[in-house]
Amino acid sequence: MVASKAVSPALFRFADASLDGRLAGLSVEIGEGCITMITGPSGAGKSSLLRLANGLDRPTSGEVLFRGAAVGLLNPRRHRRTVALVFQHPIMFAGSVADNVAAGEPTRPVNDLLKQAGLDASFASREAKELSGGEKQRVALARSLGTDPDVLLLDEPTSALDGESASRIEASTKAFVHDGGSVVWVSHDTSQVQRMADRILTMADGRLV
Amino acid sequence: MSVTDIGFVGLTVSLVLIVIALGLSAWQQLGLERSIAGATMRALAQLLIVGLLLGYVIDEGRPLWLSWLWVAAIVVFAAATVARRAPELPNVFPVGLAANVISVAVSVAVTFGFGIFPLTGRTLVPVAGMVTGNAMRTAVVGARRLVDAVEENRDEIEARLSLGNSPSQAVKPTLRDALRLAMLPQIEANRTVGLVALPGAMTGLILGGVDPVDAVLVQAALLFLILGAAAISVTVIGLAGVRGMFSADERLVV
């Protein structure tokens, strides 16, 4: 099953992609329909890879292709809704949890999204900035899921969470892939990498090792 | 001698206060003597030159286009000042120029279109000058606030972009806060006007012998114009300024 996922068509192709000293000629293909875990020391360029994939940055040289098309040439809003990014430190916008999820102009009801991210409906009316770190991260996940993405880009989403919160994020992510989504997940946690990965990529000094 | 005709003797006597400032600086070893003397000489020279030129431009025998030319010059000069004081804002000169042109155009259209003042060089130049000066100050504050706020809220703006928000959606809360902060000093100035300092136009009119109530009416009209122009200026700075902060593919690039 894992092997069949690994040979699925390339979701992303990084072709000699560089970015201001953060990435140095990265070349890699990332497959569709699976969880690709990216690991490596701090400053290896893992977050930069995700930012390029989401289109928040543009490579200073080389190319980043999504399903065969250069990311820089795609409609940025549509692309970002298709390839949702969850940041390491969840940014909560002013207002309630429902306001936060609504900021992504979700295609499904807020409560459904909260449930998918492991939060019950009672959270909808709570002030987002007053939540715990784990709750914020799940709101961020719900917000990203609201754009009905094909791909989740996760930048160490569980690094500051307790075991239970991390397990909930992992369960939501596995369910997302089970439903046909693809995940690119940056993590420092070796056991999590082993537990979640269909494929593991290790980076150092802005390239693959 | 009328109260508005102080002559060179009066001017010289008023320099006593500058001498006091110089003395205080020397006494407290502030090291500001050269700056005070330089600023005083510069102000005097600039005002004398402007006074002579202005006397020529707004003389009743001169064509009105000379006054319009003067207004155009101060609008461009104000845009250059905005560009010098807030260089961090992308495309700051054209953005500052647009802010000044639009705020002055609206103010002049209202002032003379509705007949608040008769359209002559003697009214056009001071009204446009006052409006431009205040619009420029608000534009500088607005531009700086905007750049700082975008830097402070970079993570939130990018989080919104990553959700597929448009740049204008992503920057909207940040822009709103920056514009509010830029407008507050102008609103505060209106709130306290007359309680401590009498505004310049009113002071000038009273010194010139105009009845204080009539002077107040003129001053109030000017204050409303200035507040409206400041709001227009800061809004143009904000809306046009943020456009240069995003690339064509909607990345935050400042």
Image: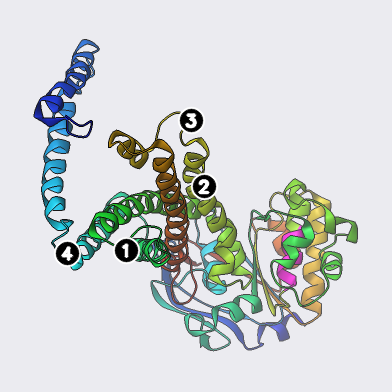
Which residues are the magenta region?
A138-146
The front one of A76 and A176 is A76
Label 3: which residue?
B195
Numbered tag placed on residue B181 in the rendering: 2
Q: Secondary structure at mark 1?
A: helix
Q: Chain of mark 4?
A: B
The front one of A173 and A74 is A74
Which amino acid, mark 4? Leu
In the rendering, at what x and y percent does residue B169 appear? Answer: 59, 68
Pointer 4: residues within 10 angstroms few (<14), some, or many (20+)? some
Numbered tag placed on residue B66 in the rendering: 4
Mark earlier in primary sequence (2, 4): 4
Tell whether label 4 touches label 1 (CB within 8 Å). Answer: no
Which amino acid, mark 3? Leu
How far apart marks 3 and 2 lie (CA) works out to 23 Å
Which residue appears at 78% of the width and 63% of the height? A170
